[in-house]
Image (spheres, helix red, strand yellow):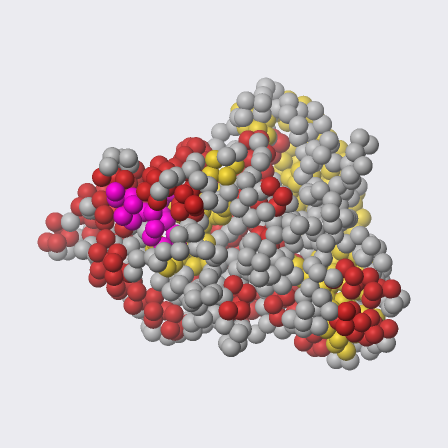
Amino acid sequence: MTEAVPAASANATREPWRDRGLPVAERVADLLARMTPEEKAGQLAGYWAMPAGPGAPVAPMEDDSHETAPSLDEILDRGLGQLTRVFGTAPVPAAEGAARLRELQRRVAAGNRFGIPAIAHEECLNGFMTWGATVFPSPPAWGATFDPDLVGAMAAAIGGTLRAAGVHQGLAPVLDVVRDARWGRTEECIAEDPYLVGVLGTAYVQGLERSGVVSTLKHFAGYSASRAGRNMAPTPIGPREFADVLVEPFVMALRDGGARSVMHSYTDVDGMPAAADERLLTGLLRDQLGLEGIVVADYFAISFLETRHRVAGSRGEAAALALRAGIDMELPTVRCYGTPLIEQLREGAVPEELLDRAAARVLTLKAELGLLDGVPGDGDGAAPDFDPPEHRALALRLAEESVVLLANDGTLPLRSGAGVVLAGPLADDPFAMMGCYTFPSHVGRQHPELPLGVEIPTIAEALHGELPDLRVAGSKDVLVTDDADIEAAVAAARDAELCVLALGDRSGLFGRGTSGEGCDAETLALPGRQAELAAAVIDTGTPTVIVLLTGRPYALEGIADRAAAVVQAFFPGEEGGRAVAGVLSGRVEPSGRMPISVPRRASGPPVTYLRSKMDGGHDWSEVDPVPLYPFGHGLTWTTFEYGALRVGESAATDGSVTVSAVVRNTGDRAGTEVVQLYLSDPVASVVRPGRWLAGWARVRLEPGDAARIEFDVHADRTSFTGTDLRRIVEPGEIEVSVGPSSAVLPLRGSFALEGPVRVLDADRVLTVPAEVTLL
């Protein structure tokens, strides 16, 4: 919060916008009245201060123009809205990056007549995306934890590092709901369930915002539902799925999280590009969902209205469409919101009120960040520590909670390292731990002469620490293209008592990986010849533990049922090797649950549990979409028993009921159960999913101990988009299921909703609180 300081000079009296004692709205209105149209437009523009070198573009073909962006000196006199990725574009030591950002801010402030610096933004999905910063687990790993408190703590740690570096805005979290895991950006998504995405995404937003960093929700909206899971492909969905599945996480992150920025989607929904959709970015996002901050363009997306979507004939027309729709800032660098926008303004094609609207939003955010008061101080000059021990400890804890034990015939935990061999393409690869929005994968691989910047133990290194007698026979080719790699792994397995086989992805950008942005998959078969490798190793008869280090789930039919055990980790970050090794050895208790269903067949239809009866398996189709491992699935070292379900008999359509159940640890080891509550609406006015996640609780129990979990279920959590596209609660029966996954639900009951159909307002209840009482 900016401290109120009374005006103390004649200059402050003459220019009220400089008076920190005035309300922000008054300061902004006064400043805006003093600006020329060019200066207002300057506040809407970003500038990529350190673009990648020749031959190593961050994005392919940038905005398709092949034109050089204007220099900083050419635009400084107008002022500048944002500085883009000063840290996250090329390897730069912490102290050097902080000094460079301070110098750039001084130049920006000195270059415009108001002395206003820029907002500095960086990517921060898996941690501050800069050289030497902590690499936290990827979003599907967050989803696997079902632990919002831990996700919030991670975000607060990331935010603290960003602020120490002089960064004001983080481009995270991604709230896209997984609809087709073939999409390369699945690794950036939390889950296939909108409620889980919303709760964990909101926790991330709250953590980042309480550290003083602006959180940017991505990508609004529809991106993850693109046709055939292809990046930037059209999204062919109707308004009901759009509202009830894809928009829901944004509702929660805006209202409960307090996010101050949103980035729109690249895609078009039913022919309307998000960047030009006024109903989406103004009617829905602002008027209905209540965004009070800024909308920023995804990189080059305003130019794409001309070059890719073909709904604009020039950069000026693209600027006019985007500004009218509600995009306040052009990122990553000024293209359309510079001279082309000013020309549209002079020709009368763009009302100046739209320019004022966007500039006022940007200046309001700058006022909140203290940027109307000049360049922030330099601090004590000490180099910030981007990977402190407490962050590594947090990364380890998150990674450990995220590992999912999919299957186990009793082979795990491993008893000793004697006779154990580790094989597979990811056995000794640090990149197996990182998604594409980590610095080593995103930028570092373009600089092979440099070290990773942080310590990232591989599975081999970490497992040696747990099992000193371990032998390693891994290869480096993630696609396993060489027969020799398969032959070597088979030979090693034949000579072993047990084989641990490390398979999965190596993330990259735009075809430079098997997962990541632009690395979409035609099928969900394991990359390259990995399935062939797994089958050959299992055929030796040596018990084989499959370890998957991936950005998406892969089809495991014919592998999982023959393996001794299967362990899933989603790019678990710099401490992921130790986390996986700890689970294999038994030092770590597996407590992760699948945030995305595991398909049975590689070429089958997209698999998600959130489907209607006709969208599931039935006798009128030979295609069975039932997953091999369902959403919410995960094993532990112990067993749990469910019982004593209690469900309130009825509630009004504006009331609530209590649902409770008892879970008991029936094994001989302590363990954590994720108790999951699902609701179903057997008769509704529109087609509904067969069930949806309504709440959950992580419960750790010692052997023999039990706990009662009580859920407070408000009628609003049964709501949906009705026949007239308004969100409603309908009277009628609601079925209740409680269990350890979306497919294993031993406790079932129901309650009645009574009263009239109720149309919901923006203040509807979004969550289901859970209370755990040890018995």
Q: Residue furthest right?
A: 541
Q: Residue 180: percent from the left, percent from the top? A: 64, 45
User: In the rendered view, does 301 fall on the left or right side of 34?
Assistant: right
* Most foreground residue, 618 or 235: 235
User: In the rendered view, does 531 fall on the left or right side of 514?
Assistant: right
Decide whether residue 329 is among the magenta residues: yes
Picture layout, residue 122 above or below residue 416:
above
Range covered by the magenta-colored residues: 327-343
Q: Residue 552: percent from the left, percent from the top? A: 65, 54
Q: Residue furthest bottom?
A: 469
| Total labels drawn | 0
Decide whether residue 687 is among the magenta residues: no
* Most foreground residue, 200 or 7: 200
Q: Residue 251: percent from the left, percent from the top? A: 50, 39
Please say whether residue 345 is visible from this viewpoint.
Answer: yes
User: In the rendered view, does 486 fall on the left or right side of 577?
Assistant: right
- Residue displayed at 73% across by 32% down: 613
User: In the rendered view, does 542 fall on the left or right side of 316?
Assistant: right
Please say whether residue 148 is visible from this viewpoint.
Answer: no
- Residue displayed at 85% across by 58% down: 562
What is the quadrant of residue 292 in the picture? Answer: top left
Give the dominant element type of the magenta stretch: helix, strand or loop: loop
* Most foreground residue, 238 or 23: 238
Picture layout, residue 726 above or below residue 277:
above
